[in-house]
Image (cartoon, grey):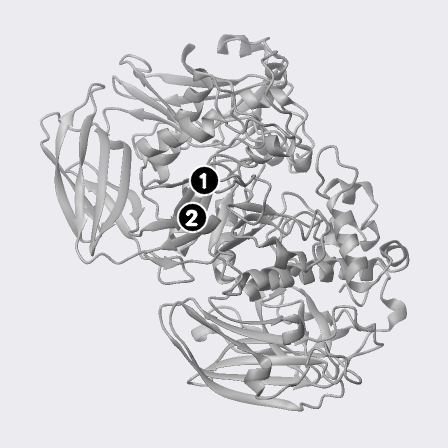
Amino acid sequence: MRRSSADLLAGAIWRCAATEPGSATDPDALETVTEWVAAPVPGTVVGALREAQSGDARAKLVASSDWWFVTTVATTGEGAWLLQFDGVTAFADVWIDGVLVASTESMFAAGEVSISAGVGVNKRVQVAIHFHSLSATLRSRRPRGRWRSSMVREQGLRWIRTTMLGMAPVFSGVPVPVGPWRGIRLLDRGVATVVSAVKHASVHGTTGRVAVSARLTGLPVALEYVTVRVGEHSQQFATATGPDGFLEVSGIVEVANAQLWWPHTHGAARTYPVTIETDGVSEHLGSVGFRTVEVDRSDGGFRLSVNGIGVYCRGSVWVPTDPISFQGDADTTRVLERLAEAGLNMIRIPGTMVYESDHFWDECERLGILVWQDMMLATLDPPDTDEFFELVAGEVTAFLRRVRGNPALAVFCGGSETEQQPTMLGLVDQHIPLIHSRLPELISTLAPELEYVTSSPSAPRGGEQLATHVGTGVAHYFGVGAYRRPLADVLSARVRFATESLAFSIPPSNTLIENEFGSLAVAGHHPAWKAAVPRDNGSSWDFEDVRDHYVHTLFGADTREVRWSDPERYLDLGCAAVCEAFASTLGYWRRPDSRCDGALTLALRDLEPGPGWGVLDWSGSPKAPWFVLRRSAKPIALLVTDDGMDGLRLDAINETANPVVGEIRFRAHSRSGVVPVDVALPVKVEAHSSRTWSVDSLVGRFTDLTHVFRFGARTYDAVTVTLEDEDGEMVDEVVHLLGGPARPLERSVGLVATARSVGKPRGLGDEEWVVDVTTEAAAQYVALELQGFEPEDSWFHLAPNGRRSVRLRRTGQATKVIGRVRALNSHTSVAVTPPSAPATQSSPAKRTSKKTSARGN
């Protein structure tokens, strides 16, 4: 619920302070505390320290102390009051005017406490929250689990309902959260307001139904009806007085000829606003969307359908945009909008993080992004006690009350690697009562329509496969990646749905590295750099070692020698190796005959500066494989893949609700730039369908474009495939280089990069810019590094005599485009020039100089 005029804590000024564990047991003991810090609420201790000190607060150790958050607010009237909190970190006590009114053991449970009349009459009321030291709590001995999680050292965390952020070495750069991290309200029951509301949308034929139940306060007891509106449709609900004295209403509003909500890749994400109205209250309750979700698990698969149409799910694993204070709404919007623009349609919230905010869910609903939600069980063994299940049931109930009406919620999952951990440790008894019986029973009662999965990963129901087997059920696939399998492993793995995949230590842009670390020379060895490299607890290797393995395998480079002599090329080769892995794996999975119905990468964004798992860096800017992910995810997409002895294969995919009618043009290029093969044919790809051709059948003759038969010298260097609609507008373009990734390093491939203005959008706003990139020879992984602008595309290939126009997004205050363009197979890079200026190439001898690096600026 949003804050209203009834909320006495709206705008309250909070402060926080640390005390020794157990030294201050009530607010009266705080009189001797002198070191207080202003604390935004909702927020956390480290968030408050970050704002107060204007510095890096990541290294602050907060778990070893008790912490107090205190505020004083003015009240009027005679009460009574209602205290509501949406989330305070584990082991917290709430005090009102020196009286203990609530305690909670769970970070994820909501709470509500009625406070009798007389408290705060015509005076100021103190609200204090005491957060007990998590370190001290973990020292209490409790029964051991059936297995030891490899993620954390403190196995006692299995008893505590808290996030793994700040607790697991893999999240080493993030502090332990302590504080009222979600909203907290003190409502005056004499002021008219909606206390709580739950809504659920369903569709029956062409009719949408919205079930709403709500509690209201501050209204006359004699009030008989309230009006609930869903869009333009309304219904009067009769009121009744509940046992706690609130007015209660419930009922159903029907919406005739309801417009359906779709994932943005398949249609419009249509929603309807819901409001509740009386003479004293008119309050927005959020929105609802009408859609159906079904999962086909036949033949060991996991095929998600929305509104009866199969959806290929692609996206990534979510991390909070502000892991310090959890208040990054603006960044959340920016990242989710970027995700939707890239053609990605699913986010998975893993069981190691936190349940996301109302703002996150509102934005996923608005943008048409599906959400796979894990239970926050991490990789730990969940206890079987009734007390623990009571905590779990409380958080699940609170979560579903918030989001059940949101059409973005597609799957609810029992946990992250909750089944995989005991399987990999060889435990015979695979039955875990919480996720296999108690939680599904609870879900079937609270939300019977919700798709439930026991764990990520998990084997098909009722089968004999293991959670570690990737060819059935829901998989975490790291054959290409952590387990250093060849790229062709994806062909034999037969993955049906990957909720995690393609984990690499991915370097950010050269500009970010220099800004954050001072030099590109830190890569691969400096302690500050290595601290941000992901690693598994207890392993003798990290994910930078994995990346280096693929650099050697794909490009034949000795990563140690390259790193020592040319750190810039070392980073470029690493980015290119990850791009190759993404392109090969995701391209195959997207093929209609791969039998894969979903692929989520690990992860969407870094938690700190450095080479993390994210395809976006910690500021939300793209890394190299982001552009590969974006190109492979388009709702209307061309795919070119190598089918071995059968040569090249072309797939045209159309996920939209309208047919695509136009022309496909296929061109093959020689090294000299000659185009010996150039064919075009009319094409129609029906809605929600695809078409497939072998290139030989498309051309009409045997070509051996890939030189698989080894007849004579290699003839072809690259192919270009384009799809244009009936109006001649480009729908998609693919450039596929032939001969493998290990290409000769040329002194120059003839790159030219020219910036030009394309005017102001509709005559308003800032001037928009495009960079035209051309090349004489084939250019491999062309990368644009600009100041004050971000390219819409980068890390792409160009065929001989090729051209690409790249639109730019303004990120700073620059009035002209400054930067450089480079290619992996070229010693020299070029400056971006205005249309009338000649292009300049950098000298190879200057490439590795700090701050003036030709390839890095």
The answer to whether residue 177 is left or right of residue 297 is right
Instruction: Name the element at disc 2.
Output: loop
Spot occupied by residue 576 in the image (x, y as percentages of width and height):
72, 62
Residue 148, located in which quarter of the rendered image?
A: top right
134 displayed left or right of 749:
left
Q: In the image shown, does 240 or 427 lie closer to the viewer? A: 427
Secondary structure at badge 1 equals loop
Label 1 crowd bin: few (<14), some (14–19), many (20+), radius 10 Å: few
**Residue 763 at x, y percent in the picture:** 45, 75
Measured Cα–Cα span from mark 1 to mark 2: 8 Å
User: Where in the figure is residue 97, as x and y percent of width and height?
Assistant: 40, 13
Q: Amino acid at mark 2?
A: Arg
Q: Give above or below for 188 relative to 566.
A: above
Quarter that holds the N terminus:
top left
Identify the residue under disc 2.
297
* Quarter where residue 579 is shown: bottom right
Percent from the top left, x then y, of residue 360?
44, 45
Q: Which one is in front, 273 or 583? A: 583
Please, is residue 703 above or below residue 40 in the view? below
Residue 481: assigned label:
none
> Residue 173: in sight, yes or no?
no
Quick one: label 1 or label 2, which is nearer the N terminus?
2
Task: Name the kind of residue labelled 1 in the image.
Answer: Arg
Discs 1, 2 touching: Cβ within 8 Å: yes
| Residue positioned 56% across, 43% down in the render | 319
Does residue 154 appear left or right of residue 844 in this picture? Answer: left
Q: Hey, which quadrant is residue 650 in on the image? A: bottom right
Q: Please give the residue where the numbered disc 1 appears in the rendered image.
A: 461
Q: Is residue 438 above or below residue 256?
A: above
Q: Residue furthest front?
A: 464
